[in-house]
Structure formats: C-alpha cells, structure tokens
C-alpha cells in the first residue's frame, strides 16, 4: 500500500510549537491549496484547507522560520480522524 501526498500552498496560520510529555517537539499549522476548475468556460478558484503536523527537529525549524502567508511544499502521509460528539 502507498499513502504519500505532496501539497504546495500557502500557510493559512502561524505554526504552533509545543512539546509532548517526553520532550518531543510537535508543530501544527494549516495550509491552503488553490485548485482551479472550469465552470461554463470560466476558470473558478477553489481552495482546500489541510492541517499539517511536523515532528522533532523539523517541527522546531518550521516554527522558527515559517509564518502565515509563506508558500510551502509539504510531503508526507494523509491521515483522517473520526470524532464522536456527545
């Protein structure tokens, strides 16, 4: 099986650096990916938003050097989560 994704887009929010209980660096940020499509011979913009999580040294580098609005390329695996609301 293969689960690899490459996204190129703009950071939709500043990275948030935190550390897990065992001291591992974790950074979260959002990315907005523009996706155009044709509608009645007109190009219409559409935007998809993704949450990104980085770990260890990469997490620290992203938090230090990146910020909202920066163009980024992200390569990793896609993971979905299910939530139950009571």
Image (cartoon, grey):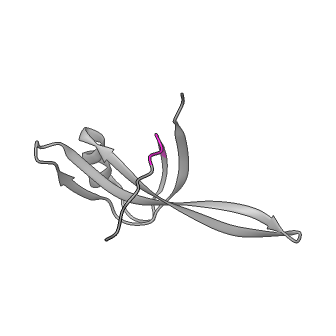
Does residue 51 appear left or right of residue 34 in this picture?
A: left
Q: Is 57 positioned to the left or the right of 46 in the image?
A: left
| Residue 16 included in the magenta stretch of the image | no
Give x and y (percent) for residue 59. 28, 46
Picture coordinates of residue 20 (x, y %)?
A: 16, 48
Residue drawn at the location 40% of the way across and 65% of the way down: 68
Q: Residue furthest top?
A: 1
Locate the N terminus by quadrant.
top right
Q: Specify start and end residues of the magenta stretch as a single range.
A: 74-79
Q: Residue furthest front?
A: 86
Q: Is residue 71 above or below residue 73?
A: below
Q: Nearer the viewer, residue 1 or 8?
A: 1
Give the image location of residue 2, x and y in percent: 54, 30
Residue in the image at 46% along x and 40% along y:
77
The residue lying at 39 percent from left, 66 percent from top is: 13
Of all residues shown, which one is farthest toward the left?
22
Say which quarter of the image contains residue 82. Answer: bottom left
In this rendering, would 43 be left or right of 23? right
Question: Residue 16: image x %, image y %?
Answer: 27, 60
Residue that protrudes farthest toward the right in the picture: 41
Tell me if residue 25 comes above or below residue 28 in the rendering: above
Q: Name the one closer to the observer, 86 or 80.
A: 86
> Which of the image's four quarters has the C terminus?
bottom left
Given residues 39 and 65, the one toward you in this image is 39
Count of numbered circles on the image: 0
């Amino acid at each position: 099986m293969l689960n690899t994704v490459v996204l190129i887009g703009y950071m939709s929010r500043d990275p948030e650096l935190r550390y897990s209980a065992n001291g591992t660096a974790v950074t979260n940020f959002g990315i907005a990916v523009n996706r155009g499509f044709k509608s009645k011979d007109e190009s219409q913009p559409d935007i998809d938003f993704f949450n990104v999580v980085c770990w260890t040294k990469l997490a620290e580098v992203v938090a230090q050097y990146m910020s909202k609005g920066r163009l980024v390329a992200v390569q990793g695996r896609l993971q979905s989560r299910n939530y139950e609301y009571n």
